Amino acid sequence: MDILLDILSWILLISGSFFTFTGAVGLFRFPDFFSRTHAASVTDTLGAGLILIGLMLQAGWGLVLAKLLLILVFSLLASTTACHAMAKAALKSGLKPLTYSDQENSAEETTSKH
Amino acid sequence: MLLSFLALTAIAITRMGDLFAVVMLSGIYSLLSASLFLDLDAVDVAFTEASVGAGISTLLFLATLKLVPRYEKKSRYKPALALGVVIVTGALLIYGTLDMPHFGDADAPVHQHVAPRYLNDSINEVGLPNVVTSVLASYRGYDTLGEVVVVFAAGIGVMSLLMVSQRTKARALTKVPADMQHQIILRIVAKMMLPLILIFALYVQFHGDYGPGGGFQAGVIFAAGIILYTMLFGLSLTQSVIKPVFVEMLTAFGVLLYSGVGIVCMILGGNYLDYDVLSHDPVHGQHLGILLIELGVGITVAAVMITLFFKFTWRTVKHKYNQ
Amino acid sequence: MNIIGLYNYWIVVVLMLIGFYIVIAHENLIKKLVGLTIFQTSVFFLYISMGKVAGATAPILDENYQIYSNPLPHVLILTAIVVGIATTALGLALVVRIYEAYGSIEENDIQVQDTHDRLECQLEAYGRQKPPTLFDQETN
Amino acid sequence: MFVIPAIILLVVMAIALARAFKGPTLYDRILAVNTFGTKTVLLIAIIDFLAGRPAFLDIAIVYALINFISVIGILRFFEFSSKTTIEEEP
């Protein structure tokens, strides 16, 4: 039973780290702010959730489990809301999302600039 | 690895002209240094750095940035002289480190004098598992009292520097709407999280004897919760919930509670801040004393931080109104 | 071993130098305060690194552990952090007041304005043929 | 078994840091700060398990809270101090 739990939490931890890593790659490589927000926030939820659940399987019943659950709730609430607020503020301040036609026109320009 | 991150961030801070970016990077810098403190076994310090450095400090810098220009002017001088002075100092300091005991050396002189006594005897004398709390509140109680008074004095200094007259406040309140009205999702989520934050602050306050935490950290977290509320729902609403006069009185009350415990100890026949006499059993007395003075610390720190933020925000409101 | 043993202290020195450099080479007062914070943090690191014992754990007593790190530096630094933010807040309040008085937070501009004011005062004083007073001695 | 996620998280943090240094607009920096913060929470949770003392998860909770609050703070103070200038250099 213990070994089963270990293997399960191992799988969860590794897949969580994988998703987090993809998010980071997206954060770094995507061309404009909104797509970066997308990459960061979506993988944030999944990756953090998987890693925390993986840790929970290791923790066993007790205060530690409760604390991990609290972290999970906080990160689910806080990180998504923060990303939403950020995107909204950016849109309000006049930052335009990069559309397909923009991309064709200015793809070289943006890549060379950054 | 983390240390190198830290150095990189610090270098990036020197190169940036936009003060907003500088403040954000200094937030990252605090987060990094807190993880490093955690790695070096300093749990309580990591706790404090996380809540103070990354939270309150960033917010205060941002509040100031709203009052002053955002961009740094390019300096006209070549910084060669400054660089020279810095490099000479650095060379001397590195020469100095060559004589230091190695990192993690258990035989270093620092570990020989008082630390073994704290580690071995505090469980019998004070009876708390968290040695940091027992040293902070009991063995070095005077020291902590001094620190709390410094925080109190700094709070008074800011209050007197950034005073805004009642008349301006009254006029401004009728005009200035609450900020972030349009962020509905944010406001609802914050409303959900606020009670959790405040309860967590109380947990940190009273669990500080057994785990990481204590008055300083709890006060800062509590203040951060109130500040979150202020940022999202506006100054006037917050001030109708918590009267500023009440907060200012609490600032003094915490210090009074702390020093009052010391005086009660003297009346009961012990030395100043000697908690053994507070109860029949010395260990029980220590428990009671530490609980009370941590409460005093927590109240003062929370009240001072809230007052600081109020003062800075009022100043912004005043500027906006005058323009 | 020598190099690895002292690596922590060297990073502390580097951080301290960066903070020091910001404080003396930049003219913006806010940036100076950030530099002071970095300098402060480097001192914290010095203390905490000295308190670390290899193979030890955090100083919260538990039956399962025997070696603990030194709790004394932790206590000192814990209070120092909170006092540090209080003094930083005081500095920020001063910056706000300076900006309101001078209209700038660049050290250079402030000094130029100060010198200008002082010269004006002196000229005014001599123009009125006042006898040299305490005020003149101060300005010299 | 906790080492591999820890290393990956460190790499992710490095990437977020790079984005924070580079970030063409200020919002990119805010996003990087937020990502950095959430990754730090995870890293601390994992370090706690690595060190074998999972009782210190309080610190991770504080991080999650403070990170949220500081991001909100940055947004709020940035919002009406400069409506027009998104680009960094004047």
Image (spheres, rainbow, N blue to C red):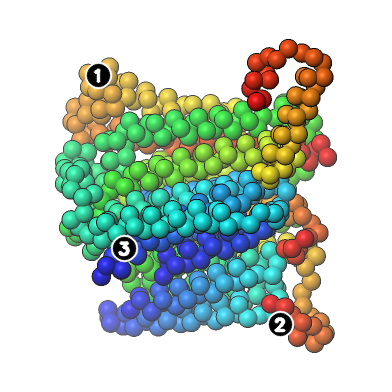
Counting from the top left corner in percent of width and height, residue B43 is at 35, 54
Which image quarter: residue B295?
top left
Task: Read off the residue under disc 2.
Answer: A111
The answer for which chain carries disc 1 is: B
What amino acid type is highlighted by mark number 1? Leu
- Relative vertical location of residue B313 with respect to residue B278 in this rendering, above or below: below
Q: Relative to A103, is B137 on the left or the right?
A: left
What residue sits 38% from the left and 31% below the top? B145
> Is residue B104 visible in the rendered structure shown here?
no
**Label number found at residue B121:** none
Task: Read off the residue under disc 1.
Answer: B268
What is the CA distance from the residue labelled 2 to the residue labelled 1?
75 Å
| Secondary element at tag 1 | loop
What residue sits 52% from the left and 33% below the top? B154
Question: Same chain, marks 2 and 1?
Answer: no
Disc 2 crowd rating (10 Å Cα; few below 14, some 14-19, many 20+) is few
**Label number found at residue C6:** 3
Question: Same chain, marks 3 and 2?
Answer: no
What amino acid type is highlighted by mark number 2? Thr
Front residue of D8 and B250: D8
The answer for which chain carries disc 3 is: C
Counting from the top left corner in percent of width and height, residue B320 is at 78, 41
What is the CA distance from the residue labelled 1 to the residue labelled 3?
50 Å
Quadrant of image for the N terminus of chain B = bottom left
What amino acid type is highlighted by mark number 3? Leu
| Secondary element at tag 2 | helix
> Is residue A40 visible in the rendered structure shown here?
yes
Counting from the top left corner in percent of width and height, residue B100 is at 27, 56
Disc 1 crowd rating (10 Å Cα; few below 14, some 14-19, many 20+) is some
Counting from the top left corner in percent of width and height, residue C21 is at 53, 54
Which image quarter: residue D78?
bottom right
Viewer-side label of 1, 3 = 3
